[in-house]
Every structure is written in C-alpha cells, then in structure tokens.
Image (spheres, rainbow, N blue to C red):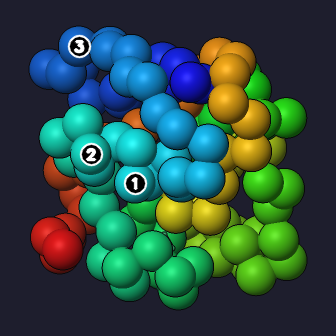
C-alpha cells in the first residue's frame, strides 16, 4: 500500500499519514480517512477545489493532463507541484507520497 504523508497549510491541523490503495485517487484516499478536502465538481476535473501540492512521489501517480493543467492555472497559489487530487490516480501498490493540503477555510465547499 502506498503511504500518503499529509501536511496542512492550516496551522490548527496536525500532519498525518494514511495508507491508500492502487486504483484510488488521492482525493478518494483522503476522504476515506475523514480528512477534509473540498471537491465541488465531484471529482471530474471541472473545478479547482481539490487543489493540493505533491511534494514527493509524483512518479507514483497518474501524469497530469492538459485539462488538469488548465484548471490548476485557475487555482489559488498554483505552483510547479500543484495537482488536482481527484486526478491523482495511484499507480503503484507501494511507495511514499507527500502532499500539502492548502487552507480550505477560504473555499466555499460542497460536501458530497
Ligand atoms: S473535485 Fe473538482 S477538479 Fe477535483
């Protein structure tokens, strides 16, 4: 199982690590572990609310598509390591991935 290490920009949230399974997306993995990450479009690459930073292990997830890049350009504070969590399909059954979840408090969320 790949391990996903999660840091948060929000200072009141503690870093944590979760185990995930190949074939799931990072969005699905964090939601299954009751970690809050907005996903207003329902995970179909049609918003920017699931924006994360992948700081390690990007070789373990599906490559970025042009459509995803277009949406990332509209995200808050995009960086080279920006991804949309709903598009980060886990390709390997082992390894370490480190992500940062941006501050969710400014995003008007829609729980699914
Ligand atoms: S949930 Fe909308 S792009 Fe990921």
Q: Is mark 3 within 8 Å of ligand 1?
A: no
Front label number (1 vs 3):
1
Tag shown at residue 32: 2
First in sequence: mark 1 vs mark 3 = 3
Left or right of residue 94, residue 50 in this image: left
- Pick the residue in front: 105 or 49: 49
Q: Position of residue 16 (x, y in %)?
A: 32, 15
Taking 6 as reference, is 54 above or below it?
Answer: below
First in sequence: mark 2 vs mark 3 = 3
Q: Could you say whether the residue bearing mark 1 is in a helix, strand or loop? A: helix
Q: Position of residue 43 (x, y in %)?
A: 45, 74
Left or right of residue 52, residue 91 in this image: right
Residue at the spot of label 1: 28
Tag shown at residue 52: none
| Distance (Cα) linking label 1 and label 2 | 6 Å
In the image, what residue occupies the spot 71% across and 72% down? 68
| Distance (Cα) linking label 2 and label 3 | 18 Å
Residue at the spot of label 3: 14
Taking 3 as reference, is 86 above or below it?
Answer: below
In the image, what residue occupies the spot 43% across and 24% down? 19
In the image, what residue occupies the spot 81% across and 61% down? 64
In the image, what residue occupies the spot 52% across and 38% down? 21
Q: Is mark 1 within 8 Å of ligand 1?
A: no
């Amino acid at each position: 199982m790949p391990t996903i290490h999660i840091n948060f920009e929000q200072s009141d949230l503690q870093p944590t690590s979760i185990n995930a399974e190949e074939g799931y997306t990072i969005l699905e993995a964090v939601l299954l572990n009751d970690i809050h990450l907005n996903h207003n479009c329902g995970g179909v690459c049609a918003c920017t609310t699931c924006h994360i930073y992948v700081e390690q292990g990007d070789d373990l997830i599906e490559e970025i598509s042009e459509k995803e890049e277009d949406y990332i350009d509209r995200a808050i504070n995009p960086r080279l390591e920006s991804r949309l969590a709903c598009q980060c399909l886990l390709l390997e059954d082992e390894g370490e991935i480190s992500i940062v979840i941006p501050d969710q408090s400014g995003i008007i969320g829609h729980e699914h």
